[in-house]
Image: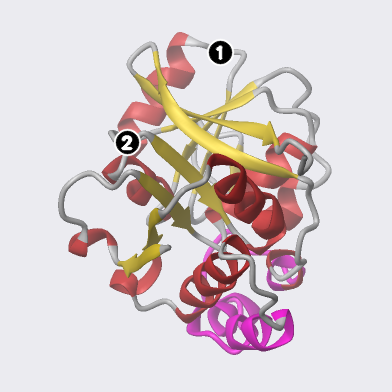
Amino acid sequence: MDVRFLGIAELDGTPPAAVVVDVMRAFTVAAWAFARGAERIVLAGSLDEALALKARHPGWAALKDGAPAPGFDAVNSPALLRSAELGGRTVVQKTTAGTVGALAVRDAPLVLCAGFVVAEATAGLLRHRGCDSVTYVVTGEDGRAEEDLACAQYIAGRAAGTAPDPAGHLRRAAHSRAAAELAQGIRDGAHPDDVALCLELDRFPFAMVAGPEDGLMVLRPYAVPAPA
């Protein structure tokens, strides 16, 4: 399998398959939104776009990075979202890195969004599709975020059919700059449980597939078929 690990700014051309990784916290939050009943997540390109979508569709829920703000229903925290009631709703998500990375590869034939919470399902879908060339988009810290790289490398190993030890990868993420900043309350809109929730390996049984719908980039949960 041809595998590349690139930051958003390093992307060149359109990969045949892309796995966009944002562990802390965009795609952990997305997975929790689906677990709480969300039907789909619209990945917005800007805060203004997110607010405009919310204004046109008052029944949608909008969330963002940072502190709470007028017009937004939630912030980008899995702990703060885990009790939300989102049954059947569309969620609009705008974050600093994760949504930016997904939109950067929106023309790829297959776009998956991932964190540790959906790692095995993501790897399983790559195996099921027979992907032999995959670009992992490491979204945080200009492609250097240790938690995203650790997760991407773990998924890549599982997708290749090997059995990497998850403990080492999770340890790297737990000692990352993002984990430290969340634990210390440096990042706005955080909860003390966020780091632990972001490091729950395979909490959810679905992968998350993004693709164009009516001019929007839409993320949906995807149940991976069982191996034949």
Left or right of residue 153, residue 184 in this image: right
Q: Which residue is mark 2?
A: 106
8 sits left or right of 56 in the view: left
Q: Earlier in the sequence, mark 2 or mark 1?
A: 1
Residue drawn at point x = 41 percent, y = 45 percent: 99
Name the spot of residue 100 as percent of width and height, x first.
Answer: 33, 48
Would you say residue 77 is visible in this rendering? no
Q: Which mark is residue 58?
A: 1
Q: Give whichever of 58, 16 is nearer the camera.
A: 16
The quarter holding residue 34 reads top right
- The answer to which of 225 and 65 lies nearer the viewer is 225
Residue 205 versus residue 193: which sits nearer the camera?
Answer: 205
**x and y, in percent, of residue 91 in the image:** 58, 28
As drawn, the residue found furthest toward the left would be: 12
| Rendered view: 226 above or below 3 | above
**Chain part drawn in magenta:** 166-195
Would you say 4 lies left or right of 116 here? left
Q: Residue 26, percent across and down?
A: 54, 53
Would residue 141 be found to the left or right of residue 42 on screen?
left
Q: Residue at x 29, y 66 (%)?
A: 7
Q: Main secondary structure of the magenta part?
A: helix
The residue lying at 27 percent from left, 45 percent from top is 104
